[in-house]
Each structure stands twice: as C-alpha cells, then as structure tokens.
Image (cartoon, rainbow, N blue to C red):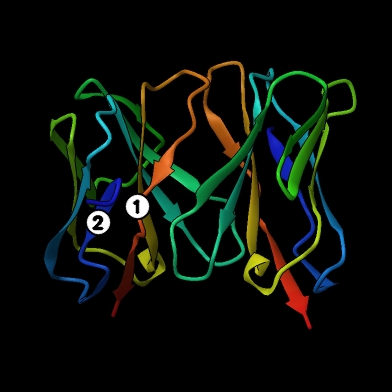
Amino acid sequence: GQNIDQPTEMTATEGAIVQINCTYQTSGFNGLFWYQQHAGEAPTFLSYNVLDGLEEKGRFSSFLSRSKGYSYLLLKELQMKDSASYLCAVRDSNYQLIWGAGTKLIIKP
Amino acid sequence: ETGVTQTPRHLVMGMTNKKSLKCEQHLGHNAMYWYKQSAKKPLELMFVYNFKEQTENNSVPSRFSPECPNSSHLFLHLHTLQPEDSALYLCASSQEAGSSYEQYFGPGTRLTVT
C-alpha cells in the first residue's frame, strides 16, 4: 500500500529552527508537496520538490531525497504565526496525491 | 474575490436531510476536487473533475453525489448521511488534473451529522 509518515505533533520556541520530517512509500514518484494549514482554514501551498536537493523560499526550505523516500521542511526564525499543521503529500505514478496526516507545530514564546 | 470559495462554512444536518455544498473557483483552473478531512487523518480524495468530466471516484458511498456544471463550479449533494460522515469537506482546484500543478484549497465546510 501507499503510505506517508510524519510526526503527529512538534513543539518549538519562537526564534528557533525546526525540521519536520516526511517519509513515503508510494507507487512511483512525481513530486512532493508541503502545505500549511492553520486551524479552521484552508491548506496553502508552501513548496514543491521533484528533484533531489534543497529548495529555499525565505524562512522555509524543503529537502528531498528520492532514493531514501524522505523529505523535510525546515522553518527558521520561528514566529508565533507559524503555529499550524504542516501537510506532506506525494504525487504517485498516476499523478494522484497521497497525503500524510499532518504535523501540528506548536510555537512557544 | 478570493481564489476558492465554499458555502456554507458550517452545516448541521440530520440523517434524513438533503443538503448541498457549493464550491466556486475564480482562478481559471480546469480541475476541481472534493476532499474529506477528519481529525488526525490524511486528506481523503473523494472526487476529481477535469474539464468538467469526472475522472476519479475513490469508492465514495452513493449518499455523496458530485455535480460539476462548468469548470468554475462544483457541488456536493448530500442525502441520508451517517454520523461518521461528520468532517471538514474541502474543495480544491488546479490548472489541470494529473499534472505537477499545485492545488488551491477553499476554507472548507464543517459538516456535523446528527
């Protein structure tokens, strides 16, 4: 079967750095997405990786290793507004998105 | 006008009621999606429409019936639902289904079945 694993919950301190991991086993691979979802709101697109390596976008970076079936989302200089759930999703060989259950990130002052 | 809108935002219905959820996208996209989001579970894809044609139906019970009259509008008709159908129903759109384009989500309808 197809599976995406990510931690259920993480806690970090304002101003610090946090890394949210995502491992996947899917039928083929056509890209990996990270989305942010604040409580009661729509998921919003953060990043897309299809080749190995690091993609940087301001305070957020996303890394992919296809051989290891592994990605991480790195958040720097954490702000209170970064408290949200972070969803990892992989597009399989049929171009269908397989979603993880999300990681709830709690930022403390 | 925000990209993807959904109405109503909250809905409480009995198991014998019939109701409809509405989604509208203002992004000029050609693909629209219905997802179910339950607490601590992955997003479940329900239906996909690409250029108004239904391309995916992920074994969804017949008490959920989608309708896509044009590329900008998507409905989810509900009838004789069960309490376990209570969840957040999200609509999304993308440039085209089966491609690398990201999906844009609406705020969702929080459905409670009593």
Q: Position of residue B48 (x, y in %)?
A: 34, 31
Under tag 2, what secondary structure? strand
Tell me the amino acid under the disc marked 1.
Answer: Gly
Image position, residue B108 (x, y; %):
35, 59
Tell me the distance, in whole angstroms, between the alpha carbons under discs 2 and 1: 6 Å
Say which mark, if any, is on residue B106. 1
> In which quadrant of the rendered image does the C terminus of chain B lie?
bottom left
| Residue sitting nearer the eye, B104 or A26 | B104
| Disc number placed over residue B6 in the picture, else none | 2
Q: Is residue B58 visible?
A: yes
Q: Residues within 10 Å of mark 1 (few under 14, many from 20)?
A: many
Taking the spot 50% from the left edge, 49% from the top edge, the residue there is: A44
Above or below, comparing residue A22 to residue B83 in the picture: above
Chain ID, mark 1:
B
Which of the marked residues, 2 or 1, is nearer the chain's N terminus?
2
Q: Is A19 placed above or below B114 here?
A: above
Query: Badge 2 local density, few (<14 within 10 Å), some, or many (20+)?
Result: many
Left or right of A97, for residue B79: left
| Residue drawn at the location 41% of the way across and 35% of the way down | B58
Q: Residue B67 occupies which quadrant of the picture?
A: top left
| A19 left or right of A86 in image | right
Q: Locate residue B106, reporting x and y percent.
A: 35, 52
In-image side of B2 versus B99 (left or right) = left
Residue B62 in which image quadrant: top left
B91 sits left or right of B7 in the view: right
Residue B91, image x, y percentages: 33, 47
Pick the front one: A90 or B39: A90
- The amino acid pointed to by label 2 is Gln
Task: Tell me whether circle 2 and circle 1 mark residues in contact (CB < 8 Å).
Answer: yes
Name the residue nearer the viewer: A11 or B61.
A11
The chain holding disc 2 is: B
Q: Secondary structure under badge 1?
A: loop
